[in-house]
């Protein structure tokens, strides 16, 4: 899951990002409203943590803009504005939750998990393709009913592929969903995680690992069969 933290307090923002990354999320950060909107328009996020008092463009304006074209993305307002009127306004404008500062990180983490569970439940929490089964809530993967242990990145890659079977995605698209903005798109990081993912699946079922295809010059997909000559 990829999150965006919009917070102009540098120390607080860095602390939030560090804590959320330790929880397994890919996290980007924006320190003002214009940067936040630019990131939101160019990147697919699962959840946004949004401060209201921001330079250049307020959180209210960001919230209004997002909800004018996207009703699905989860938005958690994190603000020092503690008046009931502000909370009502934020929720009425389309925020999914509202947490006031000062706050406890563990409460924030619980609220983030709750919002992401709601998003997942609208899709499906347990999804499968052939002999591969993934539980996105419990973060468990089984192959032929045998559990396999994946890293966070491996799980993220598989989750994206299994949600959209038989669709081809570039390495850049998969990395955008699983990694945060600091990743080097030209490194071998992705290839290493893809190799490791296939190897772990193959240890249980060699045929299951062959469901993950590399389409030469295009990207990757989860598919039963593919035309000869297209796969590396």
Image (tube, rainbow, N blue to C red):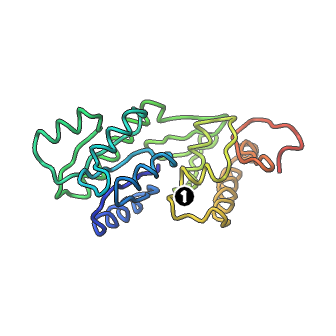
The residue that disc 1 covers is 151
Find the residue positioned furthest to the top. 122
Q: Nearer the viewer, residue 222 or 182?
A: 182
Residue 10, by quadrant, is bottom left
**Residue 230 placement (x, y as % from top left):** 85, 44
Q: From the viewer's perspective, is residue 85 above or below residue 3?
A: above
Frontmost residue, 124 versus 99: 99
Q: Going by the picture, which residue comes out furthest to the bottom?
A: 11
Residue at left offset 47%, top offset 49%: 1
Query: Tag 1's secondary structure?
Result: loop
The image quadrant that residue 130 belongs to is top right
Label 1 neighbourhood size at 10 Å, few (<14), some (14-19), many (20+)?
few
- Which residue does the image show at 25% across and 50% down from the upper left? 52
Q: Does residue 219 lie above or below 185 as drawn?
A: above
Say which quarter of the image contains residue 119: top left
> Which residue extends farthest right?
229
Please tell me which residue lies in front, 53 or 83. Answer: 53
Q: Position of residue 134 (x, y in %)?
A: 54, 41
Q: Residue at x 71, y 45 (%)?
A: 212
Tell me if residue 70 comes above or below residue 57 in the rendering. Answer: above
Residue 200: give x, y in percent of width and height. 65, 55
């Amino acid at each position: 899951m990829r999150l965006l933290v919009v917070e102009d307090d540098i120390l607080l923002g860095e602390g939030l990002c560090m804590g959320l990354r330790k929880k397994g999320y890919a996290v980007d950060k924006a320190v003002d409203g214009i940067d936040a909107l630019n990131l939101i328009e160019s990147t697919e996020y699962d959840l946004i943590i949004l401060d209201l008092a921001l330079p250049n463009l307020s959180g209210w304006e960001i919230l209004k803009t997002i909800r004018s074209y996207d009703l699905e993305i989860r938005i958690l307002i994190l603000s020092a504005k503690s008046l009931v009127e502000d909370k009502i306004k934020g929720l009425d404008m389309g925020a999914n939750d509202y947490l006031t500062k000062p706050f406890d990180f563990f409460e924030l983490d619980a609220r983030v998990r709750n919002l992401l569970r709601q998003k997942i439940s609208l899709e499906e929490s347990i999804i499968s393709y052939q002999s591969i089964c993934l539980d996105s809530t419990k973060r468990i993967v089984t192959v032929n009913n045998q559990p396999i242990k994946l890293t966070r990145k491996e799980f993220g890659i598989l989750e994206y592929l299994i949600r959209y079977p038989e669709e081809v995605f570039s390495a850049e698209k998969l990395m955008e969903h699983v990694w945060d903005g600091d990743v080097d798109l030209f490194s071998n990081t992705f290839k290493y995680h893809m190799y490791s993912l296939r190897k772990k699946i193959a240890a249980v079922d060699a045929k299951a690992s062959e469901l993950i295809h590399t389409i030469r010059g295009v990207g990757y997909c989860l598919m039963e069969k593919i035309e000869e000559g297209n796969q590396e």
